[in-house]
């Protein structure tokens, strides 16, 4: 069964600190892996997209890694800011019928405190 | 920057009533999607639409649901006879296709069924 599991469920860190969020998946056939940021009551916003051949990708203070062999990904946030408080969702897609179908993780709720 | 828009932002309806949720995708996109997120749960895929027809739907998307692209710009989700368990955030997304993986999400419509 196609599944995406994330850990931790929630995380509290102090402003300026770094953190790493984890994602494990069992999705096949794998197309790509995305990390989204979702503010409360808003739609998800894409942070990174990685294909099978990519093992790291950065977007500002966000760096995602992908190990396609172990089917694991991580999202590292450096020098956290209060505005980083949000849910971070790992999404794995597979290509079916000409489009990408997305399997969502439950997300990690990050709270950055001053 | 072009974005996906959704109306209304919040819809309250009584059980058994029909609702229509509206989305305006990004203008040159070819693939359209609806997702829902029950409060506190993960985002779930409902349906994808391409070339004026449904290309895939999940088990959630039963006969009570229908989608339409009535005028080449709007993309609608209709729920014929709402149930209490239909209360959720409904997100529309669109994507360019043609090898582009990205899906752009709208801000969502919060549907409350009483």
Image (cartoon, helix red, strand yellow):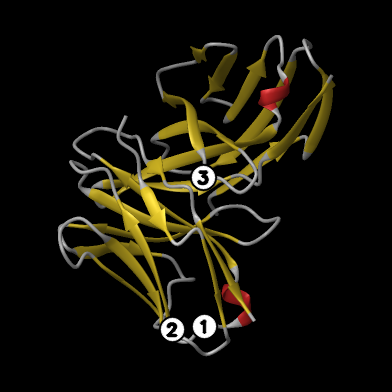
Q: Identify the element where label 2 is drawn.
A: loop
**Looking at the picture, does residue B22 appear above or below residue A36?**
below
Q: Is residue A24 toward the left or the right of residue B81 in the image?
A: right
Total number of numbered discs in the rendering: 3
- Residue on which the image places disc 2: B18
Q: Which residue carries the number 1 mark?
A: B82
Q: Are marks 2 and 1 on the same chain?
A: yes
User: Which quadrant would the N terminus of chain B be assigned to in this image?
Assistant: top left
Residue A13 percent location from the top left of the image:
83, 22
Question: Which quadrant of the structure image shows residue A84?
Answer: top right
Q: Residue A43: which disc?
A: 3
- Helix, strand or loop at mark 3: loop
A106 left or right of A32 in image: right
**Vertical order, B27 against A32 (above or below):** below
Q: Residue B70, how many percent across, how many down?
A: 19, 68
Pointer 1 and pointer 3: residues touching (CB < 8 Å)? no
């Amino acid at each position: 069964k196609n599944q995406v599991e994330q850990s931790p469920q929630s995380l509290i860190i102090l402003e300026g600190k770094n953190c790493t969020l984890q994602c494990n998946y069992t999705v096949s056939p794998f197309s790509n892996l995305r990390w989204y940021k979702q503010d409360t009551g808003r739609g998800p916003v894409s942070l990174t997209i990685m294909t099978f051949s990519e093992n790291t990708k950065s977007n500002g203070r966000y760096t995602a890694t992908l190990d396609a062999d172990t089917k694991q990904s991580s999202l590292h946030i450096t020098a956290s800011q209060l505005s980083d408080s949000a849910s971070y969702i790992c999404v794995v897609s597979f290509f079916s019928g000409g489009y990408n179908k997305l399997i969502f993780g439950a997300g990690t709720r990050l709270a950055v405190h001053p | 920057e072009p974005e996906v828009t959704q109306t209304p932002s919040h819809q309250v309806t009584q059980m058994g009533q029909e609702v229509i949720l509206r989305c305006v995708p990004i203008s040159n996109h070819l693939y359209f999607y609806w997702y829902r997120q029950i409060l506190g749960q993960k985002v779930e895929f409902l349906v994808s639409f391409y070339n004026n027809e449904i290309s895939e739907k999940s088990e959630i998307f039963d006969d009570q649901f229908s989608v339409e692209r009535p005028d080449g710009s709007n993309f609608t989700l209709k729920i014929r006879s709402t149930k209490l368990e239909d209360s959720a955030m409904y997100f529309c997304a669109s994507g360019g296709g043609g090898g582009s993986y990205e899906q752009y999400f709208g801000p969502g419509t919060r549907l409350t069924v009483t």
